[in-house]
Image: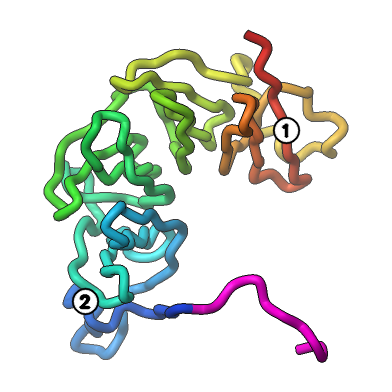
Amino acid sequence: MPKGYRPYLERVWEKGYPVESPAYQPSAAGKRPRYSPTNLAIASTGDIYVADGYGSSFINMYDAQGRWKFTFGGKGREIGRLDCPHGIAIDRRSGAERVLVADRTNRRLQYFALDSKPLGLAAEGAVKLPCHFDFRGQTLLVPDLKARVTLLDGTDRLITHLGEDPSGTWGELRRQPRERIPAGRFICPHSACFDPEGGIFVVEWVEAGRVTKLRRIV
């Protein structure tokens, strides 16, 4: 560390493989389930929900002191199960906190109570491969790897799809040089967020790599 360097943030705690969880215990052959977290969300209580999106499709909950409390989900298609929970957020739009999960490979959004109880699906048919979330008031922003960004209202009804590729050629376009990808036409939105004025930044997971800003005009 350079002399005189002063860090902006203090490390409070750090968690690695969730060895406390029964879901992550080794098999009889000694092999541990894969663990590769993709995102997390923090409730008003300070509890932390860590989505193991690229690992074993569980969500691990820790309290504000970093102590493991419980694990839920796990790979499957039935309600309460997950397959690549890539994104996770605490949705407060209804007035109560719910855990909202981008259940990507299952092509759906799924709600859970803070205690892990499944609460059902949302916006069925409106998403294809949802990746993550951002909120602006009652509007929910969902970047979708299937070549579009989706906006939902406070009751999870579809407002619109942005930058959707109607031709179905997005799989070919993603291999092209960046300058050949049409502006405003999305290929593989992996993350997105609102700016303070209501514009939207979109990050695309493509070979060339691309960040797009959409300016709000109404």
Label 1 sits on residue: 212
Residue placed under numbered mark 2 in the picture: 21
Residue 136 appears in the rendering: yes
For the point 53% across and 32% down, the residue is: 146
For residue 78, which quarter of the picture?
top left
**Label 1: how many residues lie within 10 Å, few (<14), some (14-19) or many (20+)?**
some
Residue span colored magenta: 1-11
Residue at the image point whose x is 42% and y is 50% from the top = 86
Q: CA distance from mark 2 to mark 1?
A: 40 Å
| Residue located 58% across and 29% down the image | 147
The quadrant of the image that shows the N terminus is bottom right
Q: Secondary structure at mark 2?
A: loop
Above or below for 16 versus 168: below
Viewer-proximal residue among 176 and 20: 20
- Can residue 170 be seen here? The reply is no
| Picture quarter with the C terminus | top right
Q: Residue at x 27, y 90 (%)?
A: 30
- Residue 194, position in %: x, y? 58, 33
* Furthest residue in direction right, as rendered: 179
Amino acid found under the numbered disc labelled 2: Ser
Q: Indicate the quadrant where residue 103 lies.
A: top left
User: Residue 67 has which mark?
Assistant: none
- Percent from the top left, x then y, of residue 119? 15, 38
Q: Which tag, 2 or 1, sits closer to the chain's start?
A: 2
* Relative height, residue 140 to residue 55 (above, below): above
> Is residue 53 found left or right of 168 in the rendered image?
left
Q: Residue furthest top?
A: 218
Q: Quadrant of residue 196?
A: top right
In terms of secondary structure, where does tag 1 sit?
strand
Could you tell me residue 130's position as x and y percent? 44, 37
Residue 151 coordinates in the image, percent (x, y): 47, 22
